[in-house]
Image (cartoon, rainbow, N blue to C red):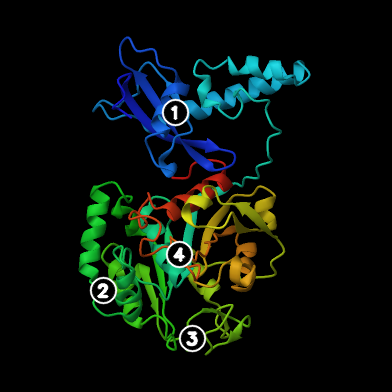
Amino acid sequence: MIDHDAISEVAVIGVPHEKWGETPLAVVVLAEGASETPVNLTGWVNARVGKQQRIAGIVLIAELPRNPNGKILKRELRKQYVDALGQVQKEGADMIQANNASYGALKRVCGLLPLAAILVTACGTEEPAEPAEIVTYNVDSSRISVSGLSSGAMMATQLHVAHSSLFNGVALLSGGPWYCAQGSMKRGLGPCMQGDDIGTAQLIAFVKQAEADGAVDSLANLADDNAWIFHATLDEAVAEPVSQAALAFYAEFMPRESVKYVGDVEAAHGFPTLETGVTCNEMASPYLNACNYDAAGKLLEALYGELEPGGAAAGELKDVSQPGADDATMLDRAFLYVPESCAAGEACGLHVALHGCLQSAEYVGDAFAVGTGYNEWAEANRLLVLYPQVASSKIAPLNPMGCWDWWGYTEDSYATKAGPQVKVIKATMDALAGRMLP
């Protein structure tokens, strides 16, 4: 972007978007004497980048805010955007009401902002559409965690490490360490399932380099987190050394007492429940195993401490949008369990529960979201539960069993903040909270 002769300085920030949750916006300082318009510059940029890197628009500004060391204050830019948008929406609502909601009134509102380009959806040249209702919740950002089964466990650790400033706990069922496959399907289906030659020390070196590059959050954030790592004794799909490698990886960054390892439950590869699913020693759809073992309750207590006992799930299981899903080989919709207390506006934590291969809505409907047992504990403990959904693909990018990307079928950046599926899940969480979470 800086290659354009008219652009002197630029900062790209993420701003709220009613459909996608968050969208990139470029804030530009024009070169002296330049007179390019935001529309022309936006077109120039988007013609030169891939679909996933396109920006929603450009705002022209006289000077970028900086700290005393010269670093651009992107947080301040986002705050200015949100404050300006709120003011315009308020004044716009008043003006529209006073002018019988005329389109002309809305166009005049758009003139309230010197840089009206930021209101692309409201101030475009087309007649404005009826805004879609957006349901947001009072998300307590100090109570956010993630868990997953099998490929979902691999994605869980990728989310946790990439956004360690956001998540404060992780639970892995039959899953390995961050970046286990190192971008190789061969490694993914070999060492990362069979357990030989995983190379945990090398993965630790990789993640430290990713931290230095800014591709993942500070690893220091992991120090006060909790981890729960589970491996069933009858699991024939993922070997126990894979789970033990995850234990060794997290023990590098957390106190050992904060990492709980469970390896003595006689169950097959699947999600153990009290009484839902196939028999405990059977590996079969929907990959829920009735083992008289409440994995959901065990892991949630390991992550959050002592909880109220799970009761009836009296809340609602809803469909929610997954912003940007098409570009990440994900389904358009995720499941969200909303306890009655959270629907009433009480502050609620948020747990992200990730299904395994052959376990998305394409294969088992809502069985994972309903049968794992998360919702019963969530109801009693003010926890929203988000169940993101990945899509299967029998053409490139090849993902015929609907697994999460833990070997690089979306992009090389799959295990970092730039990973397509990581970005979609984060955007979905932001949309539920009605704000950008840490």
Q: Secondary structure at mark 2?
A: loop
Mark 3 vs mark 4, foreground winner is: 4
Looking at the image, which is closer to me, 254 or 390? 390
Mark 1 vs mark 2, foreground winner is: 1
Residue 265 bears which disc, if any?
A: none
Check disc 2 and report the residue beneath it. 198
Place residue 313 in its image quadrant. bottom right
Say whether marks 1 and 4 touch (CB < 8 Å).
no
Mark 1 vs mark 4, foreground winner is: 1
Looking at the image, which is closer to me, 271 or 374? 271
Amino acid type of the residue that numbered disc 3 sits on in the rendered structure: Ala
Check disc 3 and report the residue beneath it. 268
Residue 404 bears which disc, if any?
A: 4
Give me the C-alpha separation between circle 1 and circle 4. 33 Å
Say whether marks 3 and 2 touch (CB < 8 Å).
no
Expressed as whole percent of the image width and height from the top left, the position of residue 173 reads 44, 74
Determine the residue positioned at 49% across, 69% down.
Answer: 400
Check disc 1 and report the residue beneath it. 43
Give me the C-alpha separation between circle 3 and circle 4. 20 Å
